[in-house]
Amino acid sequence: MAGTKALLMLENFIDGKFLPCSSYIDSYDPSTGEVYCRVPNSGKDEIQAAVKAAREAFPGWSSRSPQERSRVLNQVADLLEQSLEEFAQAESKDQGKTLALARTMDIPRSVQNFRFFASSILHHTSECTQMDHLGCMHYTVRTPVGVAGLISPWNLPLYLLTWKIAPAMAAGNTVVAKPSELTSVTAWMLCTLLDKAGVPPGVVNIVFGTGPRVGEALVSHPEVPLISFTGSQPTAERITQLSAPHCKKLSLELGGKNPAIIFEDANLDECIPATVRSSFANQGEICLCTSRIFVQKSIYTEFLQRFVEATRKWKVGIPSDPLASMGALISKAHLEKVRSYVKRALAEGAQIWCGEGVDKLNLPTRNQAGYFMLPTVITDIKDESCCMTEEIFGPVTCVVPFDSEEEVIERANNVKYGLAATVWSSNVGRVHRVAKKLQSGLVWTNCWLIRELNLPFGGMKSSGIGREGAKDSYDFFTEIKTITVKH
């Protein structure tokens, strides 16, 4: 550690106060490979204190009217928007994504998450039915569940943390959240805004640390009845095991192996730039990124040539470079994992058209030890290959030909995941037909990543359990009760 600059030291936020921890772990700047921050290495004691604070804050917060809670959420949104540049700079440095992406997507969407749920909480209605012949009336009420355990990932740190915190708070729950230990800075910065916005102490508690220590303590705590998790399938399996004895409510948003299906009547002028983006945005570190591209044989050669040309123009650079399309991957270990898939593809006889091992990566001297990788396009690969079946979560995509509609639907569905898919065709009938048959929670046609927050978000099969969105998040973060009154 000798010779390094003063490190940023984070603290847990429990019961409205920042509290130091007895032990810390290093956090690295992905663009340089250097330690720049120290994150609390919390455990059971910190979780116990956070749950206690959340339980004590629950009666007061849950008894506030939706209008009062909405006002507080809007205040958080306003403060976050006023600090947009500061948060964008921090998110880019911490995660490795380009500053441009943090400015235009991550932080604005975090602001929108608070505003969206501040509004949606005001528009839920209850059901009422009458049984006149028995002199009874039935109605339903929804009540907050209690302490919500929220675990968010490192790829979209504040974006996905706020997507959980906002609906949990809006519905009247209190929160104990665990961000990824790899990207904790913006969650820590958010705590100051929560206090300024008038969020009462104990309503939102953020405890930093690793999954095995903090995550397991949170998930197995008997007084946390609900867990919302975004991350990998193996972690979700562990969460399910630890939650089972307590019958907790679970929402699990997991990985994907998302196909793009490009038919011969697709508009390639629109399809190619959109598919480059869907493959490599945020270094390919988005669960919705395209990693299998099926192209109809009659246009396969033209598509591949144009796609590779466009990919080579996708500039990899330091996150602060305004011309960079892609920054650094999250960690050295993750970079090596992603590279290993390219090596395995080569060993299987695949061809690498551009990127890893083919083109030269040009970086400033200071960034030579950063976790950068060129966007990589693979062909001549079998559907059974690990590159076609496993989630790589990096800037790697495979392009393969297909003949018929029926064939490509079967091949697209032939993986354990079912999160998202894209279909490119100018035939409206085909678009509807294929979208209906794909085993995916989301299907975009002739576009990618256009989201309507009111509508359900989530996956099928090993891509998760449950949905998020206006109604779906409200349903998850509340319990329904039927009341019958005889008059």
Image (cartoon, rainbow, N blue to C red):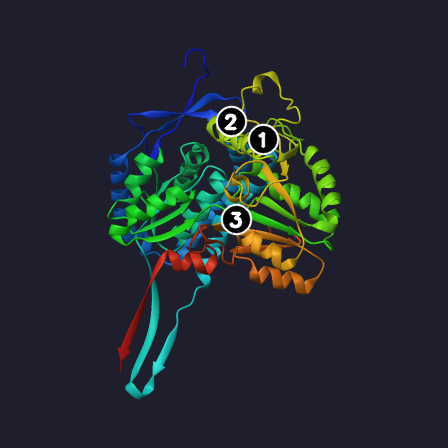
Taking depth in this image into account, of 453 and 239 the one nearest to the observer is 239
Name the element at disc 3.
helix
Please report whichever mark, 2 or 3, sits nearer to the chain's N-terminal start: 2
> Which amino acid, mark 3?
Gln
Is residue 485 in view from this perspective? yes
Q: Nearer the viewer, residue 62 or 484?
A: 484
Question: Label 2, on which residue?
Answer: 30
Q: Do residues under tags 2 and 3 come within 8 Å of each other at their CB atoms?
A: no
Question: Left or right: 297 with respect to 462?
Answer: right
The quarter of the picture where residue 307 lies is top right
Residue at image position (69%, 54%) is 263
| Residue depicted at 30% across the width and 44% down the height | 219
6 over 104 or under it: above or below: above
> Residue 48: which disc?
none
Q: Is residue 228 above or below residue 404?
A: above
Instruction: Indicate the secondary structure of the residue bearing disc 1.
Output: loop
**Viewer-side label of 1, 3:** 1
Q: How many numbered circles are shown?
A: 3
Q: Residue furthest bottom?
A: 133
Please report contact status of discs 2 and 1: CB closer than 8 Å, yes or no: yes
Q: Nearer the viewer, residue 418 or 379?
A: 379
Q: Residues within 10 Å of mark 3 (few under 14, many from 20)?
A: many
**Cα distance, mark 2 to mark 1?**
9 Å
> Where is residue 221 drawn, in percent x and y?
26, 45
Whether residues under marks 1 and 3 lie with C-beta atoms below 8 angstroms apart, the answer is no
Q: Residues within 10 Å of mark 2 (few under 14, many from 20)?
A: many
Q: CA distance from mark 2 to mark 3?
A: 27 Å
Q: Earlier in the sequence, mark 1 or mark 3?
A: 3
Q: Secondary structure at mark 2?
A: loop
Query: Which of the labelled discs sits on residue 327, or is there none?
Result: 1
Q: Which residue is mark 3?
A: 112
Q: Quadrant of the N terminus?
A: top left
